[in-house]
Amino acid sequence: MSAALRLPLGPAAALALLVALSTRVTPALAVPVALVFGLGSAALALASADRLRRLIWLAAAATACMALARLALPAGVLSFSFDPLADLRGVLAMPLRRLVPDPESAILLGIVLGERAEIPGDLKVAFARSGTTHLLAISGFNMTLVAGSVALVLRGRVRPAIAAVLVTVAVAAYCLLVGLAPSVARAGIMAAVAALGFALGRRAAALNALCAAVAVMLVLEPDAVADAGLQLSVAATAGLLSLQAPIAARLGALPPALRHGLATTLAASIPTIPLVIGAFGRLSLVSPLANLLAVPLFPPLMVAGVAASVVGALSLDAGRPLALAAYALALALRRIVETSAAVPGAALDLPSGPGSAVATAAVVAAIAVVAPRARFIRPRVSRPRWWPPAPPRRRVAIVAGAFVVIAGLGVGLALPRGPALRVRALDVGQGDAFLIESDGRYALIDGGPDPGRLVAELGATLPPWARRIDVVALTHAHVDHGAGLLALFDRFEIGLALEPRGLNDVPLSTLWHQAADRAGVAHREVAAGARVRFGAAALRILAPNDDPKVDVPSLVVRLERAGFAMLFMGDATEQAQADLLLDPANLGATVYVPPHHGAATPNGPSLVRAVHPDAAVLSVGANNRYGHPTPETLAALGSIPTYRTDRDGTVELNVDGAHFSVRVHANDLPAPRGRPVPLPAAAR
């Protein structure tokens, strides 16, 4: 009974849990359970001699009455989904997409705004294997970290009551920002309870508030008892309230910020281990270390992401420095997660279900009881005598600032200058996407079939501050060349959009025009004879030439710069190829991209003779169903060095004058596995 006196609202939470579990078995069982235990609690309240015991049982009886009233209501009558800031969330998401490369942009969208749809599948698996998925989910753990961070920042700087109010306001604002769905509301309640405990310094009051929150949520929504998000939220919050202070006390030698950060991580993680195993059947062996490294990045990442989002929504230029800081933190988090997940045996697949959860809980409880009593574990880590005293903060700031400046200058001087011209055949699968860089300016010819793959390739290829593409060219209205380009207008500043004169009127071309108009990008129809300059390079358009026999007009582009030329044939039809061969002198180039991914054409040998290239590049998907490149095309190329994205990944050509060097697998992205974004058949 002494434990109940310290936690007077515990019986009410236990009764709500029992009624909710009865509802899961059969709704008819919940009514007698609520009646029996409600009447029993009322009888105990009448029989109690002192006021505290009477209040304990009255709270339980009141919970039973509320549960009975709730059971009398029709199912789903209290369900809600309140999202008043959906439009604002779209405005705040724009700077993160526009100023931060992928996949770091997707990480920030998940953490700051709760939008996880853009996170690549491989990265989601890495988060799961490293036991850090909670950093992306809008769960009690995630939101408690937000609230706990605010509480830690305010603690000791303002009065506890003011800190409690500010923490509650921060949690409520974050809930509204990410959309007040029922799961988010529950997570917000858990976070507010834990953070109020930190801010007020009263663990007993916070634990009672947690019990009250659990009782109310289960009474209003009994089915939530089976929701893994609620279970994880309650476990993480209870761990923070019960374990954070004792763990922090045993880390006394560490600086306060690191000590409290590590204690918060461990306190919230340990109680969730049995639930994770029971629900998902996975035990991440690297989770403790991964979380110790990753969780301290969460508060500054959240602050930088929110700042970049808010300031960038007002002015993209003002938001760029903040976006670079957010990118650096997100990149560090991604590297930690991917490195942890790549460790052999990083995660174990175990049987899921209640039995596994109970067994794991027993093991965790045994370790928690036995470990502090073991002789080889010191009850408290104190500062050793040889540990130097902490230097004044001003001295630390001056030294750190000087180090950053010197390191930045050194890195800037050490960075090698790039080539005058660089061309990359991006590995986008069965499609074309060529990125050209000239004097810090960029042009992109086609974008492949998958918007997600294109932005991933650009994120792995471009420097993080390069968020402008000066020229974007859609050679023709086929999905394997143009669907990926639809993602650019929301993520990059586009200078000029090019398309062939007479572009076919299909769904893809409609979407292309709508995206350009929505972003306010000028688009221009070009044909043979047009010339577009960017930097010291130029794109000379050789086709289309308005031949009425060509039913699919496709740009044929010749990149020119100081003795170097590269010919991009796009999907020029056989008739368009024949037209070009009427004036073969225009076709000569150093590097040749054959038409239609290397499809067979009777003009193949004639084109190779006219171009007379030193190398050829083919953008094709591995094991594509079309058999590209065909034996006929490879035979026409003969002994010319040929590079293929299906075998060589992203191919990079570094051009210096008339000479060039080739680098294959030019970024660390795995080969594309995703299917193209589906579009109507008429768009193909």
Image (tube, rainbow, N blue to C red):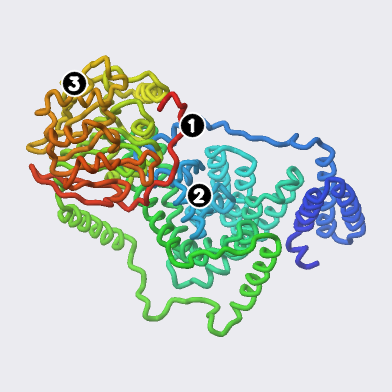
Discs 2, 1 touching: Cβ within 8 Å = no
Relative to residue 194, is residue 382 drawn left or right? left
Q: Which residue is mark 3?
A: 528
- As rendered, which of 649 and 439 lies closer to the eye? 649
Relative to residue 230, is residue 74 drawn left or right? right
Q: Which residue is mark 1?
A: 88
Say whether disc 2 or disc 3 marks the residue closer to the N-terminus. Answer: 2
The alpha-carbon separation of the residues under discs 2 and 1 comes to: 20 Å
Discs 2, 3 touching: Cβ within 8 Å = no
Q: Residue at x 70, y 56 (%)?
A: 208
Relative image position of residue 322 (x, y in whole percent): 34, 43
Relative image position of residue 293 (x, y in whole percent): 43, 62
Q: Which residue is mark 2?
A: 136
Q: Is residue 322 visible to the viewer in this orientation of the structure?
A: no
Relative to residue 575, is residue 248 drawn left or right? right
Determine the secondary structure under disc 2: loop
- As rendered, which of 560 and 156 lies closer to the eye? 560
The alpha-carbon separation of the residues under discs 2 and 3 comes to: 50 Å
Relative image position of residue 524 (x, y in whole percent): 26, 20
Determine the secondary structure under disc 3: loop
Q: Residues within 10 Å of mark 2 (few under 14, many from 20)?
A: many
Residue furthest out toward the top: 548
Q: Is residue 575 visible to the viewer in this orientation of the structure?
A: yes
Image quarter in which the N terminus is found: bottom right
Relative image position of residue 195 (x, y in whole percent): 58, 53
Of badges 2 and 3, the one in the foreground is 3
> What's the residue type where badge 3 is placed?
Ala
